[in-house]
Image (spheres, rainbow, N blue to C red):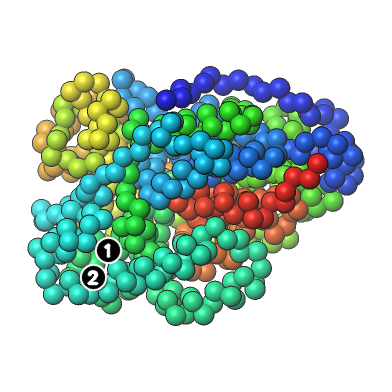
Amino acid sequence: MPSRSPAKKPQLNFYNKAMKTDSAVLDESPNTPRLASVKKRAVVIGSGFGGIAGAIRLQVRGYQTTLVEMRDKPGGRAYVYEQDGFKFDAGPTIITAPFLIDELFELAGRKTSDYLKIVPCSPYYRILFHDGRKFDYTGNEAEIIEQINLFEPSDVPGYKLFVERSHAIFDRAFTDLADMPFDTVGDMLKIAPDLVRLQSHKCVYALVSKYIKNDYLRQVFSFHPLLIGGNPFQSSSIYAMIHYLERKWGVHFAMGGTGAVVDALIALFKSLGGEMMLNTRVEEITIAMGHVNGVRLPGGDVLPADVVVSNGDTANTYRKLINPKWRKKWTDRRLEKMRYSMSLFVLYFGTDRTYPEIAHHSIILTKRYKALLNDIFNKKVLAEDFSLYLHAPTRTDPSLAPDGCECFYVLSPVPNLLGNVDWDAVKEKYADAILESLEQYCPDLRKHVVTRRIMCPTDFEKDLDAYVGSAFQFEPILTQSAWFRPHNRSEDIEGLYFVGAGTHPGAGLPGVLSSAKVLDRVVPAPQK
Ligand SMILES: Cc1cc2nc3c(=O)[nH]c(=O)nc-3n(C[C@H](O)[C@H](O)[C@H](O)COP(=O)(O)OP(=O)(O)OC[C@H]3O[C@@H](n4cnc5c(N)ncnc54)[C@H](O)[C@@H]3O)c2cc1C
């Protein structure tokens, strides 16, 4: 298992102090003889999963690639907090479509299993309702039907039809289109008949309700958009494909936590000759004659590049790193008009005992489903009740906590910073209220918490530079999907590309890893 190596500033062969940021020095062809005579260089801004995967792909294709990350460790939302002997994955925990990770190792002629152990989880999720009922959600049809029978046997035929629909959407939206660029209106028009046929204008909840009548079951089969920042009552029904995606490839966990996947991919990238700079915030993408030619680092140094890929927050990449004179499409005004996903309140905590009755992944739903989502996404108020996702990774890998202890995080979807919540004032009380509510599942929980830390919307803004503290960037609604999202190949600037949650296809590990695959289609081969 590769270990995380300490931050080491790479030697930058092509650093050119004279190359400051504005037009005088940059008033030259993007393919200057100076750069053309050496190996083509790519800079990737940000080391989230999309950034790391993109950097590996560019390095494999022959670009000399530098990954520049402003934090002290790679991973982005998949950062790792280590505290009092507990290891907390900060963000993603549910690994679906693990083949997208395998592909990165295969590109380099390696095998994932030489670096990582990824194991299946069962149940995928345990869904706990406010009145004590529960639903164990797995990938096995017979088991799911057994669970449906406990709620509403007459919904079984409807469920089977729902799976067929989810499969049909998956075939088109994921298999055909997740790693295809949406560069032109024509690309969008080509899929318009499918969007109509698949009734993409409907929301996920409406589609599920067409097939399933029971209220509990409607929640079970419609909550998935929340995993990628969407409201089931607003997200296009194309996201109903997640049900089929999970069934097809399973729900997995990486031993050592998701941070182990980050470590393994960084080790792979470096072994291919890629360079990484940590603690380095890109302050500007430098542009000449409408074409990128580098990135400006703190202190004014410019790292030259033929290709720049941003994995940073897409809205803030345009707003903060690119001079407005180059931005015809993604102006500040237009970015302000986009709809941003909700944020998250995440409480990481360790206990001095274990709770074997708690599943690895639990979804705990309050009585209010639609109304609570409306509070979060539309009214943008902090409600007194909450629906939660509880992560108990020590169920699968006890090594993440000291002996006899348990490692948890609990996540509550909350309004982004366009709401008016004073997080400094409320966050400790909100955390206490969540722990108190969890005592119905973990008796005396508060007495056993020995360490805790909070990540709230202001931390998304501060630590990740997330515009309005959004946890998943643009909300996944139809009018912000595919061609309507900021494109993987910038519409405004030549040589600039995007990977990660803020571009096509969107948030979640399958989405951001697929966005890196799009790079292989839109970034030209590095001609010597
Ligand atoms: C709490 C939480 C739980 C989640 N759970 C799951 C899950 O279980 N399964 C799943 O599939 N998805 C999950 N998601 C979604 C998933 O984690 C994200 O969609 C995905 O990890 C985002 O990856 P990304 O490539 O967009 O980059 P990000 O992770 O957003 O990383 C971007 C990086 O860019 C860096 N950066 C930004 N600006 C600059 C700059 N100017 N200079 C240098 N560096 C910069 C940032 O520091 C950051 O490291 C979860 C998200 C959250 C927040």
Tell me the kind of residue under disc 2. Answer: Tyr
Place of residue 342 in the rendered image (x, y in percent of width and height, measured from the top left): 42, 53
Q: In this view, does 84 lie above or below 349?
A: above
Place of residue 93 in the rendered image (x, y in percent of width and height, measured from the top left): 35, 41
Q: Is mark 2 within 8 Å of ligand 1?
A: no
Read off the residue under disc 2.
Answer: 159
Q: Is residue 462 above or below residue 141?
A: above
> The residue tagged with tag 1: helix, strand or loop?
loop
Crowd band around label 2 with a 10 angstrom C-alpha radius: few (<14), some (14–19), many (20+): many
Q: Nearer the viewer, residue 327 or 44?
A: 44
- The image quarter containing residue 327 is bottom right
Q: Are marks 1 and 2 in contact (CB under 8 Å)?
A: yes
Q: Is residue 355 above or below residue 193?
A: above
Q: Earlier in the sequence, mark 1 or mark 2?
A: 2
Q: Which mark is residue 221?
A: 1
> The residue tagged with tag 2: helix, strand or loop?
helix
Place of residue 411 in the rendered image (x, y in percent of width and height, measured from the top left): 31, 44
Tell me the kind of residue under disc 1. Answer: Phe
